[in-house]
Amino acid sequence: GENVEQHPSTLSVQEGDSAVIKCTYSDSASNYFPWYKQELGKGPQLIIDIRSNVGEKKDQRIAVTLNKTAKHFSLHITETQPEDSAVYFCAASTGSARQLTFGSGTQLTVLP
Amino acid sequence: SQTIHQWPATLVQPVGSPLSLECTVEGTSNPNLYWYRQAAGRGLQLLFYSVGIGQISSEVPQNLSASRPQDRQFILSSKKLLLSDSGFYLCAWTFAGELFFGEGSRLTVL
């Protein structure tokens, strides 16, 4: 089955700097890659996703890039703010949500 | 708009007691519904999913069961809780191919 590895497990950045979280996947048939943000004590929130027919997608300060050849995708957050502090999860799927495989999460801390 | 409600938010139960967590979705019909467990703040593990009333698929063997008595209601149950059942339980649903989570239920088994 699919295996998703996520790095780093923890990341601290200064407010205003950029943060990058990387994930690799094993199944070349995976075609859907969402990212979730989970604040303490809350459920994960879908913040951005990308499908295999595009290489990059942006939404304000957040962007995701996908390299299908290398089988990795990354989340980029620019101009980080304290409210960006949370655990971020990547995931990969070959089709339905039932087939989503999640990474182990990255604790992002934005230092004021 | 579609919303998902999950309760109770927190629950402390003794070992051997029963469990019932409920989840309802509003603003849609015939949704695919899911129960996930998250241990130690990480690692989302799919427990059950349902594509319709009375249709439940289990992803991992465990002490828990799920039921879907109504189209937009999904229930996670146990007859006798174990210490290892402690965790953060998340109900989720899909819309347009995307997975959305509820706010979660924190279960502590003592």
Image (spheres, coloured by chain):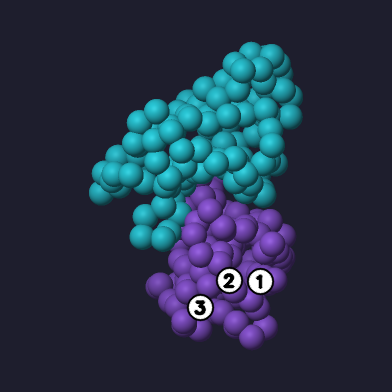
Chain colours: A purple, B cyan
Q: Residue extending furthest front? A: B55
Same chain assignment for discs 1 and 2: yes
Q: How would you rate the neighbour count of disc 2 (Cα within 10 Å): few for under 14, some for 14-19, many for 20 or more? A: many
Residue B27: tell me if it is visible: yes
Neighbour tally class for label 1: few under 14, some 14-19, many 20 plus, Cα within 10 Å: some
| Chain containing mark 3 | A
Q: Amino acid at mark 3?
A: Ser
Q: Is A73 situated above or below B92?
A: below
Q: Which mark is residue A52?
A: 3
Q: Earlier in the sequence, mark 3 or mark 1?
A: 1
Q: Are marks 3 and 2 in contact (CB under 8 Å)?
A: yes
Q: Position of residue A16 (x, y in %)?
A: 53, 71
> Is residue A51 placed above or below A96 in the rendered structure?
below
Residue that badge 2 annotates: A30
Label 1 amino acid? Asp
Quadrant for residue A88, please give it: bottom right
Which picture quadrant has residue A67? bottom right
Residue ID for mark 1? A27
Look at 35% across and 36% down and name the residue there: B72
- Give me the chain letter of mark 1: A
Relative to B84, A73 lies left or right: left
- On the image, the x and y values in percent for residue B24 come to 37, 34
| Residue A40 in the image, given as x and y percentages of width and height | 56, 44
Q: Helix, strand or loop at disc 2?
A: loop
| Discs 3 and 1 share one subunit | yes
Q: Return the chain for callout 2.
A: A
Distance in Å between CA atoms under marks 3 and 1: 13 Å
Q: Are marks 1 and 2 in contact (CB under 8 Å)?
A: yes
Q: Nearer the viewer, residue B86 or A100?
A: A100
Identify the residue shown where x is 53% and y is 73%: A31
